[in-house]
Amino acid sequence: MKLGIVGLGRMGLNMALRLQRAGHEVIGTNRTEDRIIEAKKVGVRTVATAEDLIKALEPPRTIWAMIPAGAPVDDLIDRALPLMERGDLIVDGGNSNWRDSKRRGERLAGAGMMFADAGTSGGIWGLELGYCIMIGGAAPAIERLKPALDALAPPNGWRHVGAVGGGHFAKMVHNGIEYGMMQAYGEGFELLQASEFGYDLAEVAQLWNQGSVVRSWLLELAERALRDDPKMERIRGYVEDSGEGRWTIQEAIEHSVPTPVLAMALFERFRSRQDDSFRDRVIASLRNQFGGHAVKAK
């Protein structure tokens, strides 16, 4: 099939390459010229703007966006709508909020067009290993996308999970679970490191992936990172979050679903960004006040 990709960053460019390898015709564009230059170097056909991309596709068009969540997606739709026709399809493969996806789907449907929200997992490894895709949308949109989805995903690696919004809701929860898993691995390896036994942590990670109930791809990545930097001395323990963990906790509150592990994992990310926090100074001061416990001066 022929489709356009808006956003040629780390995932978008690799997705374009994987589609091309499967025989699909891809046209790409990006907000910044450096990524367009990079795409040209690896053989991806490019145009300068999203408007040029739309003009280069014959209707019914399929446009797959791999751009940041929020205003950039709405801006793309604003720019695209005047140039698009009934039956055209926009896919949002980024990490958008599922409520925004529902709103966008209703907007496009009102203009006679289609929208699909594709929660996409696989990161920088997706080019070789494929992408896990959780996609929401109407059946005709998914049927059109099937050849591309088959190319992007490994065998059994994509599912039509429901109506518009369902794809990004599933990806939101997926990422919330990811927070909890990473937090558990981090705490466990810290305890191993603190013990008296001098463990080779990379070897432990490799061992645990041999039939253990805690084996996972994340554990494979932990082994890789620990072999490269056994004491994690090259990076700061500063952990960002890109929004999905917060949305997961908000939805848990809305549905009265207890998610204490996921909530704590998110709060630990906030904690990682603090250095000599006011909270800890209050706690140290209180211990000194009631028990005369020693404090450390600044």
Image (spheres, rainbow, N blue to C red):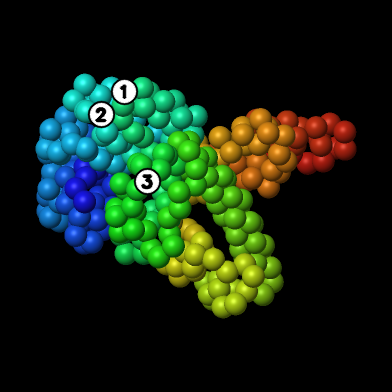
Residue found 50% across the figure and 43% down from its top? 162
Judging depth in this view, the residue of 239 and 57 nearest the camera is 57
Question: Element at badge 3?
Answer: helix
Q: Earlier in the sequence, mark 2 or mark 3?
A: 2
Question: Element at badge 2?
Answer: loop
Q: Earlier in the sequence, mark 1 or mark 3?
A: 1
Judging depth in this view, the residue of 132 and 222 nearest the camera is 132
Judging depth in this view, the residue of 203 and 18 nearest the camera is 18
Residue found 26% across the figure and 39% down from its top? 63
Q: Is residue 279 left or right of residue 103?
A: right
Indicate the amino acid at tag 2.
Arg
Q: Quadrant of residue 112?
A: top left
Q: CA distance from mark 2 to mark 1?
A: 7 Å
- The dot on residue 142 is 3
Q: CA distance from mark 2 to mark 3?
A: 16 Å
Q: Position of residue 30 (x, y in %)?
A: 21, 38
Q: Is residue 1 visible?
A: yes
The crowding category of the residue bearing disc 1, from other C-alpha atoms within 10 Å (few below 14, some 14 to 19, many at least 20), is some
Residue found farthest to the right: 291
Indicate the amino acid at tag 1.
Ala
Q: CA distance from mark 1 to mark 3?
A: 19 Å
Please name the residue that numbered disc 1 is placed on: 111
Residue found 41% across the figure and 39% down from its top? 138
Please name the residue that numbered disc 2 is placed on: 86
